[in-house]
Amino acid sequence: MVTISHVVEKLMDDYSYLQIAIDKNIISFTLLAKYLRPEIEKELQKKVKPSAVIMALRRYAERLDKKETQFKSHFFRNIILKTDVCYMVIDGSTDTLNKLQNVYNELNFQHGDIFNITQGNYDISVVTNKKYEEEIIELIGKEKIKQVVDDHVSISLLFSQDYSFTPGVLYNISRNIAWENINILNWYHTPTELSLVLHQNDAMKCYSILEKMLKKNENNFVMEQYSTL
């Protein structure tokens, strides 16, 4: 039997932007119940009391809070910020990948160098340090470079090894960042690390958002910053 709670949960899952409003405690359950009531009555094909909708919303909020708390427990307390990051889009080919290998051999990861390659059906995206930009352009050829984006940073979050198998990790991060109108140009990950590429003007705002998400284990928090000039 479909109940008010079932319909409320379905609607709230569809309206994901409302979830973060509830999480931030900036929404009135009374007004939200008034907004959702017509759709609930249409689904159930009967009139429902506002108080019943409000109660269902409160229960949903409690479950949402428990999910958020469970999600936070999967983070390590470590964020790495790397500055002077360059994002490049290149025509995809085997020859291009072979040439990029020459740059890879010069990298020193212990000193903050980054070099991430993502191969699509037609393009190759490269996230690397600004200091390698001219070398890559000269190596590949200007005619094969589709786009170059400077003035970006990379923010990496280190996780416990089970994060890849935890539903909602990417969603929870992206929804909190999108709420603050921050654009993620690119992201890439390994089984223990998620890296976001965004404009340098948004770096500290994004860091602040991530810090709030991780505040439960604040005493263990570590931030590392690399300047890659």
Image: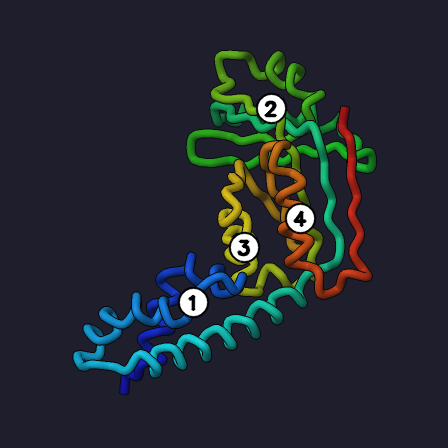
Question: Of residues 149 and 180, which is closer to you in this image?
Answer: 180
**Disc 4 residue crowd, few under 14, some 14–19, many 20+, Cα 10 Å:** few
Q: Kindly give the residue lying farthest to the left in the view shown.
A: 45
Left or right of residue 14: residue 116: right
Q: CA distance from mark 4 to mark 1?
A: 26 Å
Q: Amino acid at mark 1?
A: Ser
Rendering coords of residue 157 (x, y %): 68, 50
Q: Amino acid at mark 2?
A: Asp
Which disc number belongs to residue 170? 3
| Mark 2 or 4, nearer chain start | 2
Rendering coords of residue 13 (x, y %): 39, 66
The quarter in which the C terminus is drawn is top right
Residue at 66% from the left image edge and 29% from the top image edge: 85
Question: Of residues 16 and 186, which is closer to you in this image?
Answer: 16
Rendering coords of residue 112 (x, y %): 78, 35
For residue 212, above or below residue 186: below
- Residue under label 1, please give it: 28
**Disc 3 residue crowd, few under 14, some 14–19, many 20+, Cα 10 Å:** few
Camera sees residue 154: yes
As helix, strand or loop, the secondary structure at mark 4 comes to helix
Residue at 60% from the left image edge and 42% from the top image edge: 196
Which disc number belongs to residue 150? 2
Residue at 78% from the left image edge and 35% from the top image edge: 226
Q: Amino acid at mark 4?
A: Ser
| Figure quadrant of residue 33 | bottom left
As helix, strand or loop, the secondary structure at mark 3 comes to helix
Q: How is the image coloured?
A: rainbow
For residue 154, above or below residue 68: above
Question: Of residues 171 and 62, which is closer to you in this image?
Answer: 62
| Mark 3 or 2, nearer chain start | 2
Residue at 34% from the left image edge and 83% from the top image edge: 52
